[in-house]
Amino acid sequence: MGMGVPEEGGVALCPALVARSVSAAVVDVDHCRPHFGVSLETDYIIEVRSTSAEFDTFRISKTYSAVRTLASDLRRAAKLVRSTETDGSAVSGVTRIAQSVSVLVDKEAGRHLGRVSYSYAKFLAKQRRSIIDIALCEVLEHGLAGHAGRDRPVVRTFFRAVESFLLKGST
């Protein structure tokens, strides 16, 4: 039986991340007009589940901007790890994941100036949804395999960024 939704820095999520028993995927997309404005924002509803029942499944809402922030945080973690860590395989693992996620996320244009049609917004959301799913898979399923020592700075730095993304409020 699950333990509920983990708190940031909590008991269940970090060990589950290290054990690679967390999966996440975009399950829905929500388009809205904030403050009755002209712009159209898209929220990606991401379902986070434990593959080993360490916590209950929960959903979060993130914008594409939040995913860009995750990529930036992973790059920052990789830079910190390169300057402090001596284990070459750990450094290359963090660097590989950070670069992979950054390339995926950053290849999509940041802002679209001017008006865009609703159908184009849906098309863009579909593209970004697949990018987010691939990035989450890269981080959660392929990330830092073989580096299970959660007290190591390289692991803590990497997973702190991931945990922050999964547990902080909608952005």
Image: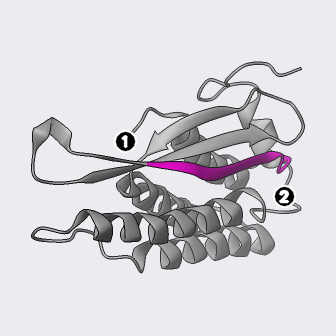
Q: Residues within 10 Å of mark 2 (few under 14, many from 20)?
A: some
The residue wearing badge 2 is 147
Left or right side of 117 for 49: right
Instruction: Identify which residue, 16 or 25, lies in the foreground.
Output: 25
The residue wearing badge 1 is 171
Left or right side of 118 for 16: right
Q: Where is residue 157 in the image (x, y as percent from the top left)?
A: 61, 50
Which color scheme did the rendering employ for the protein? one colour
Q: Main secondary structure of the magenta part?
A: strand
Which numbered circle lies on residue 48?
none
Instruction: Identify which residue, 118 or 124, lies in the foreground.
Output: 118
Q: Which of marks 2 and 1 is nearer the N terminus?
A: 2
Residue at 38% of width from left, 76% of height from top? 108
Asked if residue 151 can be seen in this view, the reply is: no
Instruction: Identify which residue, 153 or 74, lies in the foreground.
Output: 74
Magenta region:
19-29
Q: Is residue 164 above or below residue 142?
A: above
Q: At label 2, which amino acid type do we have?
A: His
Q: Is residue 5 magenta?
A: no
Which residue extends farthest front? 119
Left or right side of 48 for 121: left
